Image: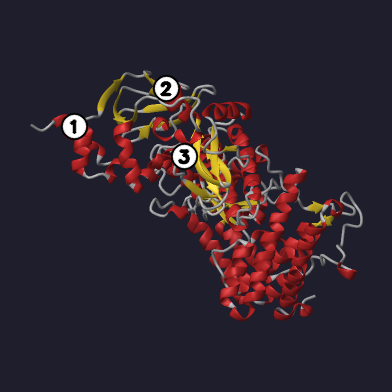
Amino acid sequence: MQNAISYRIADFLKKFPPFSYLTLKVLQEFSQEITIVHKEKNDVIFESEEKPHPHFYVVNKGAINLIKKDEGITIDICDEGDVFGLRPLMANENYRLEAKAQEESILYAIPIELFRPYSKVNASIGNFLVESFASNTRNPYSKSHKGQLLGDTVKFNPNNSGSRLLDVQLVEYSKSIISSSPGTKIKNIAQKMTKKEVGAMLIEKDELPVGIITDKDLRNKVATGEVSITGKAKHIMSSPLITYPRKLTVTQAQMAMMKSNISHLVLTEDGTTNTKAIGILSKHDVMVSLGNNPAVFVKAIKRAQSVDEIKPIRKGITNLLKGYLEQNLPMALTSKIISELNDACIKQIVALSLAKMENPPSAVFAWLAMGSQGRSEQLLHTDQDNALIFENVAKSQLEETRSYFLDLAKKVTAGLNHIGYEYCPADMMASNKKWCLSLDEFKKETKSWITNPGPDEILLSSIFFDYNRAYGDKELVDNLSEHIFETVSKYPIFLAHLASGALQNPSPTGFFRQFLVEQDGEHKDFFDLKRRALMPLIDAARVLTLSHNMTGISNTWERYERLAQLEPNNSEQYLSCSYASKALLKFRTRQGLLNNDTGRFISLEKLSKEERIKLKRTFSTIKDIQEVLSLRFMTSRVS
């Protein structure tokens, strides 16, 4: 006779991952071992630091709050189909959060030991559980989370491991290896582990790894009396070893540990036991790495209910940036990640500011990030450059509409200032009525710059034309972009003026290729990295982008990479510019983090000889691209 209850459980679970990856027949058999748990409102399922249960949970009906008890913060709310309580399955550690019923709820308790084999042999299940556990997202494939790990512009594909940031973030591991030989007495092994305060001992033969002994081995094999403490290491060591190469990502490490049900991985020079060990990775190391995962930051930002909650997260993002630079991740990837996190902060601050307004907006609008943030190149805390564009309204409603958005913009810019972004000294912010305009007003303004390009208009264009939509209506922004490109195509003389403006930034070097430093003022004898090195490359890319009617790309090195495709004869030069712009931004970021400032002004005395050489290598590229501008746009005619 069929078990009607287990069949109903199977039919329910089949709708939701990771159970949807199992066949219905397997699910029906599996569901016979599932326990149904009923909880009243405010009942506790498990408490923080409670020992792990022998099962994890799925919500059938109701809602469960996951609470960070020491801070009294609700981290997540799980509802129908959501999985929670995965820590016993993934890490075999005490619970970090408290789970409490928000309302009367029915849960399915899934036996861990019964489910573990499926997670090992089915990659889809394993990936789902790792993503859920690693990002604290109870269902990363749900409609509210799918594709949102990095914001709206980065898509998450569960079938493509290369698309997840957990797959590019390297784990930090212990490089201090404590080792012994297979013939070492177990007693000596235990004493050495205690003295060195380590949880694992590597066993090596002929300087190559052959096994590992962990605290668990000592408990399960020696303390139980199975093996005498006077025995030898080879009698209790885990062998053959599971080894991996040094560049191991968070996801790879978690999957490896889960697959083999182990707590330590040995890293070797080539990932095999045929080369020397270079480090040992523990579950604790993995958990530390997860604390600085961008997906965790994005979720925390979106959950923030006040600007005060975002401020410490922003500091965490800076620590993440430091880690990426230390790991020497590609600058393009680092910049993309940090810019997405910055955008997430802006979006949440705009949303929080809207919630403070007495009424909702009467017109569609968009918040524009300009300058370095618009180019996805603002890695350090610099000043704000932003604008607000709203849809066209009747003339009689224009000032009232603008007044509303100015009030909103003041709240947003104040919020950005609170989390670390200084107010723009030139007041190029949406809280200034000059930068809070309707679509038609912005069209009129930008057309005026293009058709009457004086020094001020060129300066404004060089800042504004690098905008990027951070929040709001996409069509508004696309409409404005189309207008700008169409107008530029009708008035090509503007490009000559813009190119001439780009050549105003002074050369990085003087006689004998010596650095040209500031001659007076607050930064006397310092080298201005932004004005003399970065800006010439940024300005040149902008002019060339406009000349090719290149839409949708605002990032400097991506512009040069696209130019290399459009002009194959000049590809080598453009790719050199792309490399130089990334190298200079990385250099500025390192200097800013080192000196706790914007990294713009550099003390040459503090640079090593190698750093000076690397800087100078980019200068010839700057000179070459400025010559291209001068010849192509005949800037001498407009000088």
- Specify the quadrant of the image occupied by residue 411: top right
Of tags 2 and 1, which is closer to the observer? 2
Q: Is residue 217 above or below residue 419?
A: above
**Way the structure is coloured:** secondary structure
Q: Earlier in the sequence, mark 3 or mark 1?
A: 1
| Quarter of the view holding residue 80 | top left
Residue holding disc 2: 225
Q: Residue at x 30, y 36 (%)?
A: 115
Type of amino acid under label 1: Ser
Measured in 3D between alpha carbons, the distance from the residue under mark 2 to the one under mark 1, in whole angstroms, is 42 Å
Q: Residue at position x 65%, y 77% from top?
A: 492
**Label at residue 134:** 3
Question: Residue at left 28%, top 23%?
Answer: 37
- Could you tell me if residue 363 is visible in this image? no
- Residue 6: which numbered mark, if any? 1
Q: Amino acid at mark 3?
A: Ala
| Residue 18 image position (x, y, % from top left) | 32, 42
Q: Position of residue 350 (x, y in %)?
A: 56, 42
The amino acid at mark 2 is Gly
Whichever of labels 3 and 2 marks the residue nearer the N terminus, that label is 3
From the viewer's perspective, tell me whether residue 347 is left or right of residue 593.
left
Identify whether 356 is placed above or below 230.
below
Residue furthest toward the left? 1
